Image (cartoon, coloured by chain):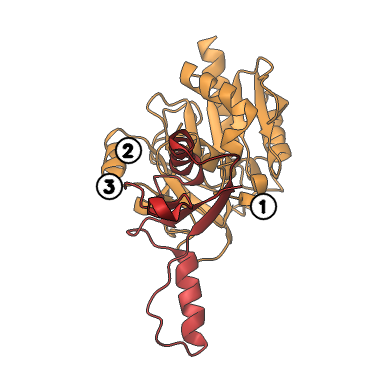
Chain colours: A orange, B red
Amino acid sequence: MRVGVITFPGSLDDRDAQRAVRLAGAEPVALWHGSHDLEGVDALILPGGFSYGDYLRCGAIASLSPIMTEVVDAANRGMPVLGICNGFQMLAEAHLLEGGLIRNDHGSFICRDQVLRVENASTDWTAEFEAGEQITIPLKNGEGGFIADDETLDRLEGEGRVAFRYVDVNPNGSLRDIAGITNARGNVVGLMPHPEHAVEPGFGPDTAAAMRSGVDGLRFFTSVIQRTLAAA
Amino acid sequence: MPTIVVDVMPKPELLDPQGKAVAGALNRTGHSLVTGVRQGKRFEITVDGPVDEAVRAEIRTIAEEILSNSVIEDVVAIDFGDAELGADETAEA
C-alpha cells in the first residue's frame, strides 16, 4: 500500500502527512506539484499549508498545478483522496468537493484541539470510526469557514455527505458546523482540522488519560489502508 | 498595450470579515460616518494587440473561472478600456 503526499510551493504539513501514513502502516510517497506522475500510488493526500502564500484565493493556484490533472482523473476513477486544510481548499477550488472556504468569521487565525463528530463513517477515510463518534484533533486555520448555498447544504446533509461536524465550538463560522465533507462515492474527503497531527502518543492533543496522548487522527490513515487492502 | 480591469467582490449575502475589520478600525479612529465596508479585488490585465471580441470572450472566461470563485465571489465589472464603445461592462451575475 503506497500513499502519495503531494508537495506544493508553500505546503507545510506534507512531511507530517508522510509520517502519519508510515505510522499507520503504509509506505508514503513524496509527489511534486509540477509533475504529471502519480508514481502508481494507491491513494493521495493533499496536505495543509499555505500554497502560493494563499494568493488569489486559498488553494486556487495550487488547484491549477500540473499534477492536479492527474489528481482529478484519479479521484473520478475512485482513488481515495484526502484534502487536509489547504488541501480541502484545493479540492473545493478543483470542484472535486462542493462549497468554498472563506476567512474565519471572527477575522483571526485560530489554533486549538478541536472536538469533531464523525457523521459519515463509511468513506474510504473514515471506515474505522463509528458514526456519531466524537474525536479530537488539532485545528489551525485563518480561512476555514465552510460555505455553500442552502440548496447545496441541504443536498450534502440529505445525501449523508457531511463527514465531520464541529462539536462544542464552531471555530470559524462554518455553516451548519460543517468541518469536512465527502463526495458521493466516499473516496474524496476534505476537512479543515488536521488528523496527521494526532497520530503518535506524546505529540497529539491532550486527553483525559494523559497530556499529548491523543491519536484519534491515526484512524483516517488506517481506514484507507483497510479499504484498499479489502478491495485488492 | 491595452489594460483590462476586472473587479471581483465577495457575494453580498456572505459575511466579509476583512471589510468588517476595516469598518471597525474606521469607526475606532473617529470616522463614525462609515456604516459598512466590503473589500474586493481589482485585477489589471495587459494583453497584446487590439481587444477584439475573441479577447473579450477569453477575459470573461478567465474572470469567471479563475480570477473569481462563483461559490463565494461575483465578477462585478470588466472594463475593457475602450471608452468610445461604452467603458464599463457589467458581468452577468
Residue B40 vertical position relative to residue A217 in the rendered view, above or below: below
Q: Which mark is residue B70?
A: none
Residue at 48% over, 29% down: A188
Q: Which residue is mark 3?
A: A150
Residue A126 visible, this orientation: no
Q: Which residue is mark 2?
A: A156
Indicate left or right for A215 with B62 as reference.
right
Element at badge 3?
helix
Instruction: Give coordinates of residue B56: x percent, y percent.
Output: 45, 40
Give the CA separation, mark 3 to mark 2: 10 Å
Indicate left or right for A111 with A135 as reference.
right
Q: Quadrant for the C terminus of chain A, please.
A: top right
Element at badge 2?
helix
Have a look at marks 3 and 1 and say if they share a chain: yes
Q: Look at label 1 and name its amino acid.
A: Arg
Instruction: Give coordinates of residue A187: x percent, y percent.
Output: 47, 25
Please tell me whether mark 2 or mark 1 is closer to you in this view: 2
